[in-house]
Image: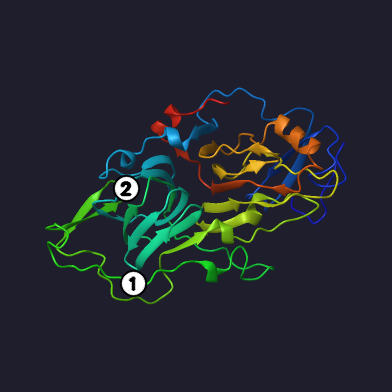
């Protein structure tokens, strides 16, 4: 049962996630590391297994996946993972959409891995660049016009995305909302024929769809708006990273936005833990209550380059974590590096995610 006093049995280090002396640190924690926890100290690497069956970790490269919008302006993003509360998609568009889109099943949160360009929205135009998060409210009409090929990680949540409630650190963590870019309305002339169209197509993206609406005026005709439900962008360079010198902090510390059953986190450059003996690598864990999708944006980990564009899915109940050789390298390099240069965005989902056939076909088969 849950208690302020945590029990300790057998051989354990004195400090949490530190001074392992050859043991393997495996955390069995509920509620995404904020509930009841057991830290189990093993002799062997718990990720050293061969798996048979559907609960199998999957790794793939974004550049190997082929969304239809990568080859056809009329195409759309590729579904990668889904459950009843969210869908995770990938877009690699390089031509402007000849249509408008409206996601009617939920909010849309997109991460810009590569590219620059413009999103036309009902709230106004939004320029984007690499490292931007783009938030589009449920049922908002928008159109994507990239300057060059743009890779977007797209997360659709059936419940609305919200910023985590302020905690002891105050309202400027995890980020200062004044640094978000909020659009100014810029209605597009709705006179027919000015851009060679007789009508404007709006695709409603939804389960069982799509449904298509045809307007005889440009749907981006908004003269003004007011309220607290609007599109915006926010760049990861402005995210306030919370750190500790004596213990590697749990992933939930890096929470960016959340919806019911969906949690989005930023793992970004930060000072490395400096107290001798502290483990600088995330501990082994098995995602007891959450599936995890990690998208590697770039950077390096103690001199080892991160595989930019790698997408990794770890299903709940199955161990995952850095390989033991990477942990040993981090220990050997303790005095050589004072920072962690990684750039990873992660999605945790309460319900189990189902990988799409296209994702499974491109699995690198590392497990």
Q: Position of residue 222 (x, y in %)?
A: 28, 71
Residue in the picture at 87% in, 36% down? 11
Q: Secondary structure at mark 2?
A: loop
Colouring: rainbow
71 lies left or right of 307: left
Q: Nearer the viewer, residue 213 or 340?
A: 340
Q: Secondary structure at mark 1?
A: loop
Residue in the picture at 58% in, 68% down? 176
Mark 2 or mark 1: which comes first in sequence? 1
Label annotation for residue 207? 2
Q: CA distance from mark 2 to mark 1?
A: 30 Å
Residue in the picture at 81% in, 47% down? 16
The tally of labels here is 2
Quarter of the image for residue 214 reads bottom left
Q: Position of residue 286 (x, y in %)?
A: 64, 38
Residue 361 seen by the camera: yes
Whether 73 is drawn above or below 63: the answer is below
Q: Quadrant where the C terminus lies?
A: top right
Q: Nearer the viewer, mark 2 or mark 1?
A: 1
231 lies left or right of 276: left
């Amino acid at each position: 049962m849950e208690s302020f006093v945590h029990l300790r049995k057998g051989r354990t280090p004195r400090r949490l996630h530190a001074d392992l002396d050859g043991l393997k640190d495996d955390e069995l924690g509920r509620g995404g590391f904020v509930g009841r926890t057991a830290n189990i100290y093993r002799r062997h690497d718990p990720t050293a297994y061969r798996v048979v069956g559907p609960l199998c970790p999957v790794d793939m490269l974004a550049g190997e996946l082929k969304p239809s919008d990568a080859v056809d302006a009329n195409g759309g993003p590729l579904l990668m993972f889904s459950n009843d509360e969210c869908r995770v998609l990938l877009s690699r568009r390089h031509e402007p959409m000849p249509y408008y889109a409206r996601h009617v099943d939920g909010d849309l949160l997109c991460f810009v891995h590569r590219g620059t360009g413009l999103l036309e929205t009902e709230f106004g135009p939004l320029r984007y660049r690499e490292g931007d998060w783009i938030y589009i409210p449920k049922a908002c009409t928008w159109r994507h016009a990239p300057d060059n090929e743009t890779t977007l990680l797209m997360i659709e949540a059936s419940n609305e995305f919200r910023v985590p409630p302020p905690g002891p650190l105050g309202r400027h963590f995890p980020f200062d909302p004044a640094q978000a870019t909020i659009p100014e309305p810029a209605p597009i002339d709705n006179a027919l024929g000015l851009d060679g169209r007789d009508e404007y197509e709006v695709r409603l993206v939804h389960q069982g769809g799509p449904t298509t609406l045809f307007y005889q005026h440009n749907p981006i005709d908004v003269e003004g708006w007011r309220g607290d439900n609007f599109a915006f962008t926010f760049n990861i360079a402005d995210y306030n990273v919370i750190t500790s010198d004596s213990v590697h902090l749990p992933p939930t510390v890096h929470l960016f936005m959340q919806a019911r059953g969906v949690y989005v986190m930023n793992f970004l450059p930060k000072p490395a833990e400096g107290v001798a003996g502290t483990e600088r690598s995330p501990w082994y864990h098995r995602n007891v209550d959450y599936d995890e999708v990690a998208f590697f944006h770039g950077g390096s980990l103690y001199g080892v380059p991160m595989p930019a564009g790698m997408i990794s899915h770890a299903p709940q109940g199955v161990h995952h974590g850095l390989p033991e050789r990477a942990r040993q390298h981090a220990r050997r390099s303790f005095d050589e590096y004072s920072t962690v240069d990684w750039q990873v965005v992660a999605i945790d989902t309460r319900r189990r995610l189902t990988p799409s056939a296209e994702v499974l076909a491109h699995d690198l088969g590392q497990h």
